[in-house]
Image: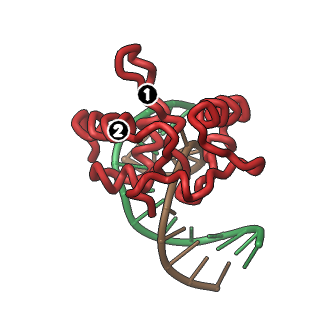
Chain colours: A red, B brown, C green
Amino acid sequence: MPTESDFAAIYAFVRAIPAGRVASYGDVGAAVGVTARTVGWAMSVAVDDGENPVPWHRVVGSDGYLRIARRSAELKALQQSLLEAESVIVAENGCVPREFFASYEA
DNA sequence: ATAGTGACAAATG
DNA sequence: TCATTTGCCACTA
């Protein structure tokens, strides 16, 4: 089961995602040794540290869809704004093209 | 303790 | 193509 180390790994990995790129929950999970659901959970509890904020907006579903959308339309708009601020294109249907995925993509 | 749920994903039907 | 099922890990009622 995921421990603090896993969380640290998840956050470290997400922070390592270069601006203008995104990664999927599954990819992040596979990279740090946890499941996709755990990554989603980690993101849900992640908060801005001030010094080392976790760019959770760079984490999307395996298909590039902003899964956050089904939970909160406002959060979806926020994520989209943050992504677009990094030159990441978010389609009107809420999907990010594969070309924006980091190399460890599916 | 059991059941339901969630910012997931891949496999089926 | 859409809907359902299963695996996954942790949380909440």
Of residues A55 and A6, the one drawn nearer to the viewer in this rendering: A55
Q: Measured along the vertical axis of the image, is residue A96 above or below residue A14?
A: below
Q: Measured along the vertical axis of the image, is residue B5 above or below residue C8?
A: above
The C terminus of chain A, quarter of image: bottom left
Callout 2 environment at 10 Å: few (<14), some (14 to 19), or many (20+)?
few
Residue A53: x %, y % from top left: 41, 23
Q: Secondary structure at mark 1?
A: loop
Residue that badge 2 annotates: A16
In the rendered structure, find residue A32 and report the number of the disc placed on it.
none
Amino acid under disc 1: Ala
Residue A52: x %, y % from top left: 36, 21
Quarter residue A9 falls in = top left
Q: Secondary structure at mark 2?
A: helix
Residue shown at 28% from the left, 49% from the top: A32
Residue that badge 1 annotates: A46
Amino acid under disc 2: Ala
Image marks 2 and 1: residues in contact by CB distance under 8 Å: no
Q: Residue furthest top?
A: A50
Marks 2 and 1 on same chain: yes
Residue A43: x %, y % from top left: 46, 35
Disc tally is 2
